[in-house]
Image (cartoon, grey):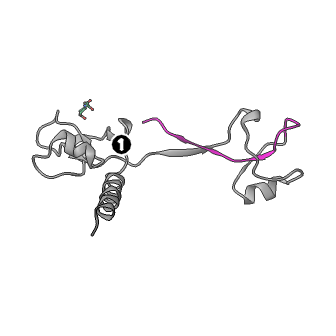
């Protein structure tokens, strides 16, 4: 293999590895009862290695896994209250029923903004 190919391949490998590591969990996702923790690492894993693997680390309680799986994010669909922030999901004159079928929010007021519009997904506090 020539040098160029080797170089391109190693760049691809680095990118692949960094995407595999997954997203960093939020603090909220790591608030689990110590006895409900699901082990995510191996014994003796460091905090850094643990977080790199996309897990939570907390060593304050002995006898339970220190590196554990984060909770799933709780999300909720809401219809935005700000009429001007609406993102059109329908077409002028769409009925509430047609809009609902598309899984969107329907409010027949005020004038001049879409009445059928997309939800927003918000993360729930925990
Ligand atoms: C570690 O876990 C304990 C017990 O659940 C909790 O009280 C503490 O706040 C946690 N520490 C951090 C830094 O999250």
Ligand 1 within 8 A of label 1's CB? no
Q: Position of residue 78 (x, y in %)?
A: 63, 42
Q: Residue furthest front?
A: 2
Depth order, front residue of 72/5: 5
Depth order, front residue of 17/46: 17
Q: In the rendered image, which quarter is residue 84 located in?
A: top right
As helix, strand or loop, the secondary structure at mark 1 comes to loop
Depth order, front residue of 27/11: 11
Q: Position of residue 73 (x, y in %)?
A: 43, 46
Say which residue appears at 73% left-offset and 44% top-offset.
87
Q: Position of residue 50 (x, y in %)?
A: 22, 45
Using residue 56 as the reference point, say whether residue 80 is left or right of it.
Answer: right
Quadrant observed for ligand 1 in the rendered image: top left
Q: Say whether residue 105 is magenta.
A: no
Which quadrant would the N terminus be assigned to in this image?
A: bottom left
Label the magenta part by its dominant secondary structure: loop
Q: Which residue is mark 1?
A: 25
Using residue 101 as the reference point, say whether residue 56 is left or right of it.
Answer: left
Which quadrant would the C terminus be assigned to in this image?
A: top left
Using residue 50 as the reference point, say whether residue 88 is left or right of it.
Answer: right
Q: In the rendered image, which quarter is residue 81 located in?
A: top right
Q: Is residue 62 above or below residue 42?
A: above
Residue range of the region highlighted in magenta in the rendering:
109-126
Say which residue appears at 21% left-offset and 37% top-offset.
58
Q: Say whether residue 114 is magenta.
A: yes
Q: Position of residue 46 (x, y in %)?
A: 15, 42
């Amino acid at each position: 293999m020539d040098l160029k190919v080797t170089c391109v391949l190693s760049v691809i490998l680095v990118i692949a590895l960094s995407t595999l590591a997954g997203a960093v969990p939020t603090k909220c996702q790591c608030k689990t009862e110590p006895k409900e923790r699901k082990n995510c690492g191996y014994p003796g894993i460091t905090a850094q290695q643990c977080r790199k693997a996309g897990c939570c680390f907390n060593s304050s309680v002995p006898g339970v896994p220190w590196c554990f799986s984060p909770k799933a994010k709780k999300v909720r669909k809401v219809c935005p209250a700000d009429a001007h922030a609406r993102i059109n999901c329908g077409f002028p004159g769409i009925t509430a029923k047609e809009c609902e079928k598309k899984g969107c929010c329907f409010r027949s007021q005020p004038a001049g903004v879409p009445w059928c519009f997309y939800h927003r997904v918000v993360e729930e506090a925990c």
